[in-house]
Image: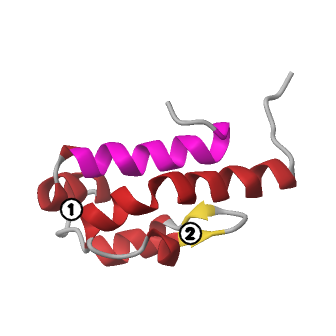
């Protein structure tokens, strides 16, 4: 059986991820998490990538770690996980 979530649950998960992580995101990245969140699609990784501006041949993950440290990368991964599960790891 496929593990899928419905529209309302997805929107709720995205809202929860944003609400629980907004302060930490702003503290680390010095900008609002809200500007990178879409109510249905969650974290807009394209917008985040543009903000992070990785070097050529550098992944966004590598650039986050280089510029902001491991805590920042862990936070971004946690936000993405929460979008699917609705709970913090």
Q: Quick one: 49 or 36, which is closer to the camera?
A: 36
Q: Quick one: 49 or 86, which is closer to the camera?
A: 86
Residue 82 within the magenta-colored segment of the rendering? yes
Residue located at (65% from left, 56% from top): 14
Residue located at (65% from left, 42% from top): 84
Residue 27, position as x, y percentages in the image: 27, 64
Question: To which quarter of the image does residue 31 belong?
Answer: bottom left
Q: Quick one: 59 or 24, which is closer to the camera?
A: 24
Q: Main secondary structure of the magenta part?
A: helix
User: Which numbered disc, 2 or 1, marks the residue closer to the eye?
Assistant: 2
- Relative placement, left or right, of 69 versus 89 is left
Task: Provide the residue designation for mark 2.
Answer: 37
- Relative placement, left or right, of 30 versus 47 is left
Q: Quadrant of the N terminus?
A: top right
Q: Gap in Å between the C-alphas at discs 2 and 1?
A: 25 Å
Colour treatment of the image:
secondary structure
Q: Secondary structure at mark 1?
A: loop
Residue located at (34% from left, 67% from top): 26
Range of residues picked out in magenta: 71-86
Q: Are marks 2 and 1 in contact (CB under 8 Å)?
A: no
- Relative placement, left or right, of 47 versus 8 is left
Disc number for residue 4: none
Task: Provide the residue designation for mark 1.
Answer: 57
Residue 74, position as x, y percentages in the image: 33, 42
């Amino acid at each position: 059986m496929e593990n899928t979530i419905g529209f309302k649950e997805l929107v709720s998960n995205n809202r929860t991820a944003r609400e629980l992580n907004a302060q930490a995101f702003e503290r680390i990245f010095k900008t609002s998490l809200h500007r990178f969140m879409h109510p249905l699609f969650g974290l807009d990784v394209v917008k985040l990538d543009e903000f992070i501006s990785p070097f050529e041949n550098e992944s966004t993950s590598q650039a986050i770690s280089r510029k902001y440290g491991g805590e920042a990368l862990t936070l971004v991964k946690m936000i993405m996980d929460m979008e699917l599960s609705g709970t913090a790891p």
